[in-house]
Amino acid sequence: MTDDRQPSIDAHGEGRSEGRATTSAADQRELSRVATELLPALIARFGEGQLGELEIRRDGWRIRLRRGDAGVPAVSTEDARSRRATSARPSAGRGEGPSAGERGRVSVTSMAVGYFQPAKTLQVGQRVRSGDVLGQVDMLGVRHDAVAGSDAIVSRVLAEAGQAVEYGQELVRLDRSGSSSERSAGSPDSARQAV
Amino acid sequence: MFERILIANRGEIALRVLRSCRRLGIGAVVAYSEADRDSRAVSLADEAICIGPPEARRSYLSAASIISAAVVTGCDAIHPGYGFLSEDAAFAEMTRAHGITLIGPPADVLERFASKAGTRRLLGGHGLPTIPGSAGMLGDDRHALAEAERVGYPLLIKPSAGGGGRGMRLVRSPRELEQALTMCRSEARAAFGDDSLYLERWLEASRHVEVQVIVDRYGNGVHVGERDCSVQRRHQKMVEEAPTPALSEVRRLELAEKAVRAAVAAGYENVGTLEFLVDHNGDFFFIEINCRIQVEHPVTEMLSGIDLVAEQIRIAAGEPLGYSQAEIQLRGHAIEFRINAEDPEHDFRPQSGQVSGFLAPGGPGVRFDSHLFAGYEVPPYYDSLLGKLIVWGPDRMAAVERARVALDELIVEGMRTNVSFHQALLHDESFLGGRFTTNMLDRIGSAAFLAGSGSSAAAPPTVPAAEVSPLPVVGAGVGA
């Protein structure tokens, strides 16, 4: 690892205190602790390996390290992969989270190819807890759950009941900032990764 | 005929299948992994559907994802291409259970040809010569010596549970056999938990020759000649050509006719390839059948004018063959060069990254099957095939000359390719003389081969064709 490989750092609160618009004093204390205790160790570990990106969840915080451009190894597919993940198509291929758009917005994506069936109770404005099943994708009779990765509010339901969906397709958008559902006005294509 | 076909593959073969679908007026849906989102096949397809992450196990090898993709996109058939699930009998059966046709042999036919040993017995019973070997497993040393005497030296000792060359030895005399048996038994026991061994005749300096057949479900079958795939590196084919320079026209015809007769008699169906080893006497021995379209199929297409992928589709749809052997005319000579993202100077290490510039060669008798474009990202997850250059000429030398011109024209910028290897090959006396054998490259070493060529036409490397090999790595009978 050379000195110019400065990782970029992105820390997100997991939205434990719903409805907050700004960082509370408690959060700031926690953030400061994370920054002084956890981050240096993480950066050191990151520097030793070949990873392009690393995400860690701890104490309600999500910390993502990404190698800076100057330090990106000559394998340009890594560039491409990160570009794809942030491209216009929202299907980043993960169940939740990393395809987050603006702060607090996360997608729940399909982990299977099949027909989507939303949970009976699923509706815009609904509060969900991390681990809640928001719907299922039926792949040849086997149901694959679409699970909320964090406590949040449903801001948009992007697939209808019975709709054919592909792997990685955005099914439900969640708003973790807790402000409300009006953020849902943005089209799926406006999703951009924050880091 | 099918309405819509799901193409469950990637790279050049996805594009190749797409082209035949278009020609036949069939809708084409491309199933792709996240790593192939920006691929040419995806952009050209009528519809494309993401089936999983880059990891093949969860995308191109996921039977459930592929079949579900076919169901939700309204496809009535799946074309598996080559590799991945193309010869998986369980996948074929699962596809059928969902009312979808897998383009290739039906599940029960795949099942019948699933075991290599079983297939050799089956086709051996229909008149195909197989590599002589011991009758079953070896008993004690005395039994082994008697069997060896019957089969004839040199011999390969092979473990029944074999793989990877472990427990395998080449022996040339009874003395060597006695010495090797104990070692082979203990190696096989350690590696596979099973020390049963058998003997197979070792073919010195053999060539890989395969016969292309097309058989419909009504028992009509034709052969479309043979291909010679003797230029191999570690059992991976690099160059294929037709007709084979190893056999006379009479022997070639005999081989092809025997192959198609046996395939029809054994109930084979669809497009298939029967692989043979040809020894220095020109005797051929059946080794295995490939129940799929092969990478090197364009060689045969260039000679015959037959679209083999279209034939696969037609036959899977239940159409009769519709022509006879007499109507198939094979003209001239064709050679295919696999253009791989590999660095010949560093042991052919696979490359990935962005292709910054790309220009395909052209001209009379030149075909370039490739999914490349400038700006394409070669993903690191799959094989390193970037494309295939296929040249045709009225005779072998004309094809060689066209190949030299075409390889010089080809531009792939941004990563290393094996083009320099092909250029060296086209000045190698063994290749030019039609004497290449399957283990020649590994015996002299690819690095030595390249160094010997000096990358220049003025200093061609010379390889004595009759040179005797040391121990085989994996042994005879391994095709790529």
Image (cartoon, grey):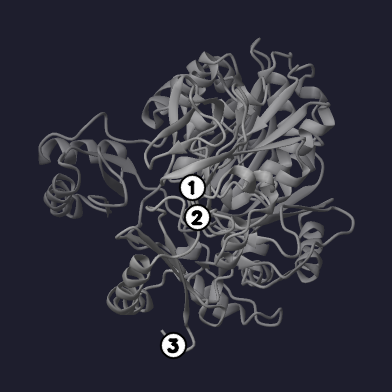
Task: Specify the amino acid type for callout 1.
Answer: Arg
Q: Earlier in the sequence, mark 2 or mark 3?
A: 3
* Circle 2 or circle 3, nearest the eye: 2
Above or below: residue A195 compared with residue B288: below
Question: What residue is at 43 percent from the left and 46 percent from the top?
Answer: B478
Give the quadrant of the N terminus of chain B: top right
Residue A124's image quarter? top right
Mark 3, secondary structure of its residue? loop
The residue that label 3 is drawn on is A2
- Which x, y percent locates residue A30? 32, 69
Above or below: residue A108 compared with residue B175: above
Q: Which mark is residue A98?
A: 2
Q: Is residue B389 visible?
A: yes
Q: CA distance from mark 3 to mark 1?
A: 31 Å
| Chain name for mark 3 | A
The residue that label 1 is drawn on is A94
Q: Is residue A88 left or right of residue A60?
A: right
Q: Between residues B136 and B52, which one lies in front from this camera angle?
A: B52
Task: Specify the amino acid type for callout 2.
Answer: Pro
Question: What residue is at 26 percent from the left and 50 percent from the top?
Answer: B168
Mark 1, secondary structure of its residue? loop
Residue extending farthest to the bottom is A3
Mark 2, secondary structure of its residue? loop
Q: Is residue B54 left or right of residue A63?
A: right
